[in-house]
Image (cartoon, grey):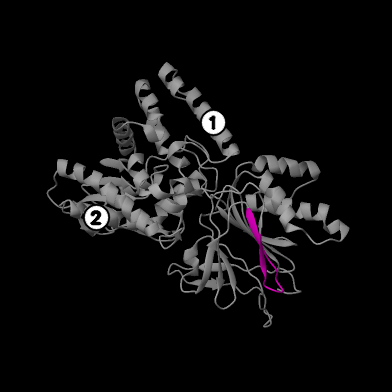
């Protein structure tokens, strides 16, 4: 608020997607001039989108720091730290100290271009953020990796808007564009004028995280003219061609039911169903799995996640009794959600449960805001551990593994989650779908080739530690 400092409010989202803003003061003159908001995508305190209060700033952050430990140690060397349990808090304290050291103590206004240029040189990770100061000035920032998107629109009514995805601007008219990686846009609160600053003279090309396209992003979002919904439908079509071969090889008495995992799997399931129909495979398209709340269960500590998974999903018992179910999902990461849903379906009387996965196997930890920190927690690596030593080396080729090795991994994971089969989209089938924009997508979840220096170092340490714990095998060692 102009001349009244920063205020904070809490928004409550109901199951019907309506939003209520809690009143933060009774003053009828309360009219925010500039506002930022965030939607938490995970439960508890482990969401990848973080917003925290401060005397001088409000910050909303999407993503995560890989080198948070180094930055925290550096700040601790300058003096005691409070409230730095999240990456958003850490960045906020870093900015506050920079302002105090270089500007405030000398009676100067903060030079945000200089502050964020130094910050962009120091951090490693995936960060898009909005910073609001006590004067109402706003800084939008996207770090040089470009893994997290940041969209902006100058609406026809004069408002300047920022959002993680351009689907947030639906229904509005105006000019939209992406904030470039390694840049800020500073907005003056009084005049409304905005100025872009490139922080890195070398320039940076966006390398959007694959999770944005395949899972995190709304189906209604598009990136450089490519709709997430259409991409996911195309993946479903390709996946359906593989599933059709397996269904035709083992004919069923009744057509299988093609069901998506709620909220994220719909476009994949639609594409797979259409693909089966094109190939003359009879099937029914019906969603037999529903959710009781919207909160994502990918993030968080294991016990808290498992509790939320058990509470989240419901199965239509009358629809699945004595039927074969093909559940279509965008990814199989840890396997605990798919295992829980499989158990529910079988308990409801399903004859068999098959999983069709719209991505290659997830082989990499993800330190950039997905809460996947170790190899051990991934279903792929649990399956690999159960392989005979002579087969592990082939599986360690990851996205280049031969089809027989992939089938063995699929069979092992299917057994672990009590499913009849699992069918992954092979990496070689994903590439043509993304062919004209491969250079703009980070595919590290499937390749273990991390997109930033600190990420590569951490993944290398992770991989060496896990391989060291496996039985010694010369072929295995050479593959690493």
Residue linked to disc 2: 273
Furthest residue in direction front, as rendered: 202
Judging depth in this view, the residue of 205 and 404 nearest the camera is 205
- Is residue 363 in view? no
Secondary element at image label 1: helix
Residue at 49% across / 67% down in the picture? 168
470 relative to 282 in the view: left or right: right
Residue 92 picture quarter: bottom right
The magenta region covers 183-196
Residue linked to disc 1: 460
Label 1 to label 2: alpha-carbon separation:
40 Å
**Is tag 1's residue or tag 2's residue first in the polypeptide sequence?**
2
User: Considering only vertical position in the picture, is 196 above or below 72?
Assistant: below
> Which quadrant is the N terminus positioned in?
bottom right
- Residue 274 in the image: state x and y as whole percent: 23, 56
- Is residue 71 in view? yes
Residue at 46% across / 74% down in the picture? 171
Furthest residue in direction left, as rendered: 253
């Amino acid at each position: 608020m102009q001349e009244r400092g920063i205020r904070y409010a809490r928004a409550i989202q109901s199951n019907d997607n309506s939003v209520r803003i809690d009143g933060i003061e009774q003053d009828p003159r309360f009219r925010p001039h500039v506002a930022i908001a965030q939607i938490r995508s995970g439960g508890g305190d482990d969401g990848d989108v973080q917003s925290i209060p401060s005397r001088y700033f409000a910050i909303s952050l999407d993503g995560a720091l890989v080198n948070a430990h180094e930055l925290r140690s550096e700040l601790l060397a300058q003096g005691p730290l409070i409230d730095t349990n999240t990456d958003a808090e850490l960045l906020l304290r870093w900015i506050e100290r920079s302002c105090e050291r270089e500007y405030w103590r000398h009676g100067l206004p903060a030079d945000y271009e200089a502050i964020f240029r130094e910050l962009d040189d120091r951090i490693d990770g995936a960060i898009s953020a909005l910073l609001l100061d006590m004067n109402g000035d706003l800084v939008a920032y996207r770090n040089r990796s470009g893994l997290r998107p940041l969209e902006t629109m100058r609406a026809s009514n004069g408002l300047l808007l920022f959002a993680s995805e351009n689907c947030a601007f639906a229904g509005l008219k105006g000019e939209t564009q992406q904030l470039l990686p390694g840049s800020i846009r500073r907005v003056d609160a009084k005049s409304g004028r905005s100025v872009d600053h490139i922080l890195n003279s070398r320039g940076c090309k966006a390398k959007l995280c694959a999770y944005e396209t395949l899972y995190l992003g709304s189906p209604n979002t598009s990136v450089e003219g490519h709709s997430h919904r259409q991409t996911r439908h195309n993946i479903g079509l390709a996946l359906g061609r593989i599933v059709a071969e397996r269904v035709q090889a083992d004919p069923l008495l009744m057509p299988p039911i093609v069901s998506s995992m709620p909220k994220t799997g719909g476009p994949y399931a639609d594409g797979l169903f259409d693909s089966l129909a094109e190939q003359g495979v009879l099937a029914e398209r019906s969603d037999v799995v529903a959710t009781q709340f919207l909160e994502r269960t990918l993030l968080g500590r294991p016990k808290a996640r498992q509790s939320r998974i058990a509470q989240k999903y419901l199965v239509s018992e009358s629809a699945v009794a004595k039927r074969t179910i093909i559940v279509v999902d965008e990814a199989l990461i840890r396997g605990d959600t798919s295992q829980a849903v499989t158990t529910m379906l079988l308990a409801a009387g399903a004859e068999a449960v098959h999983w069709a996965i719209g991505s290659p196997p997830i082989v990499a930890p993800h330190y950039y805001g997905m809460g996947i920190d170790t190899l051990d927690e991934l279903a792929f690596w649990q399956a690999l551990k159960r392989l005979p030593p002579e087969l592990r080396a082939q599986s360690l080729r990851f996205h280049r593994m031969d089809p027989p090795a992939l089938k063995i991994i699929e069979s092992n994971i299917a057994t672990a989650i009590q499913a009849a089969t699992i069918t992954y989209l092979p990496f070689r089938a994903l590439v043509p779908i993304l062919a004209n924009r491969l250079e703009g997508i980070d595919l590290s979840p499937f390749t273990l080739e991390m997109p930033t220096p600190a990420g590569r170092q951490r993944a290398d340490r992770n991989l060496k530690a896990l391989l060291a714990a496996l039985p010694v095998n010369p072929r295995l060692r050479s593959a690493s």
